[in-house]
Amino acid sequence: MKTNAWLLLLLLAPAWANAQTAADSAALFKKRVLEAPEIALLSSFYSQEGQNAAVTGGIGTEELTDLATEIGIYIPVSDDGVLSISGTVSAYTSASSSNLNPFSGASESGDDDDDDDDKDGPAGSGATTGTPWAASTGASRQDVWANLNLAYSHSSDDRNTVCSGSLSLANEYDYGSLGFGLGLARLLNQKNTEISIHGNVFLDKWRPEYPTEIKTFVEENGNLDADFFQGVPILDINGMPIAKTAPEAWRPVNNSLVENKGRNTFALSLGFHQILGKKTQMSISTDLTYQEGWLANPMQRVYFADRPNFFIGEASDIPVYATAANDGVFQLADDIERLPLSRLKVPIGLRLNQYVNEFVVLRGHYRYYFDDWGIRSHTLNVEMALKLGMRHTLYPSYRLYTQTAADYFAGYEQALSTSQFHSSDFDLAGFMANQFGLAYKYTDIFTSARAGRLGLKSLSLDYSYYFRDSGFEAHILSFGTSLVID
């Protein structure tokens, strides 16, 4: 019996040796997931204008500019693994956010010839007047948002399974975030089918900032002659100074501020990608998201229809308060935005790519979204890739978006003080939006353009114009490049 076992082993040894040699050969010549380190740079400039600022209760300037730069480094750490390190710095200036404290400095109306831009305070008090329609000089008018991401992905030897993990950090002056995620993608059917699942958790923390009148009222225990209120008349709707100690004097409806400074997000992404033929690909995806914690923005004011109005500033501007003609009076808030402590978001997307010929590829995407706050939305995006030779491609695109209003949305002076939840943020309103875009990309797969050890892989330039039926509009210009390090 032992002799037969040894004989069988000797007979199988050549086959085993050949198999081992083939395996070693395959491992030796296995194509790397990423052949060489790469660097990706992306810079973008964003500007917007509108008349429904949430910080000032649903009216006022939404003028904002943002300049952002992202750097990504992709390093092959083995034949199968890739380490990704990326960081983003975004510097913005916001007229709306500046009015967190509209009384902190002279308003900037943009008209240097108008002596009324820097008015003395009401009744000669010396306090600076504010208006929702121009930027204040408050510290909140500008900020820097920074983000760092670390990710690692590992592919199996047959390249049919990819595992990934990520860690992210983000910070700005009133908000911090820590995130981490895991992912798994599996290719089947000779790589014609892909199934993926990704999970992400973000543990965020508010460092809340509040409208200055509400913050001061709470900190001074309701004393309307303390801090910036001192010596400053408060006017009623008729422009007459009120008695600050009277029972009917101005006071916020709710004196409680942010109680739970945490805000956690749990997201599960599921994807199915299928090659339907030589010219057609499709995919279906969903991103189930559950959020808990303080989901409202404490910077955003709300004004109630069933409460009297009170102002600081020029009485003559009260009749035109809700128009851009107001350049000298600001209304004291009734409350801050308050929303439920949880939210479930469910988007479902369908994507279809069609190869027409060697010069044209069509890409279409539809997404339906709903949440338990009452929003329902539809997104339709169409893009065309026009090849202008081996290296040059144009991408004209169009996007249509519609949504219903959240259950808790109410515009300026439309919410009621009896409501538990309320917001005047027009991102939660019902609206329709259009976006037109045109992008250009230069691709050099041989990286023939070089500077030392750096080879140019691609260049891109992208412009989009976005506008809503509410009058809000935005321009986005971005430039990107990808480099290979030999």
Image (cartoon, rainbow, N blue to C red):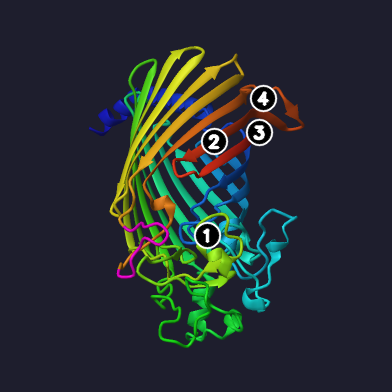
Q: Residues within 10 Å of mark 4 (few under 14, many from 20)?
A: some
Q: Nearer the viewer, residue 267 or 312?
A: 312
Q: Is residue 411 magenta?
A: yes
Q: Is residue 155 magenta?
A: no
Q: Amino acid at mark 4?
A: Thr
Q: Is residue 290 above or below residue 256?
A: above
Q: Amino acid at mark 1?
A: Val
The first of marks 4 and 2 along the sequence is: 4
Would you name the residue on which mark 3 appears? 483
Q: Residues within 10 Å of mark 1 (few under 14, many from 20)?
A: few
Left or right: 199, with 393 as reference point = left
Quarter of the picture containing the C terminus is: top right
The first of marks 3 and 2 along the sequence is: 2
The first of marks 1 and 4 along the sequence is: 1
| x, y percent for residue 197 | 35, 42
Q: Residues within 10 Å of mark 3 (few under 14, many from 20)?
A: many
Q: Which residues are magenta?
A: 408-418
3D distance between C-alphas at marks 4 and 2: 32 Å
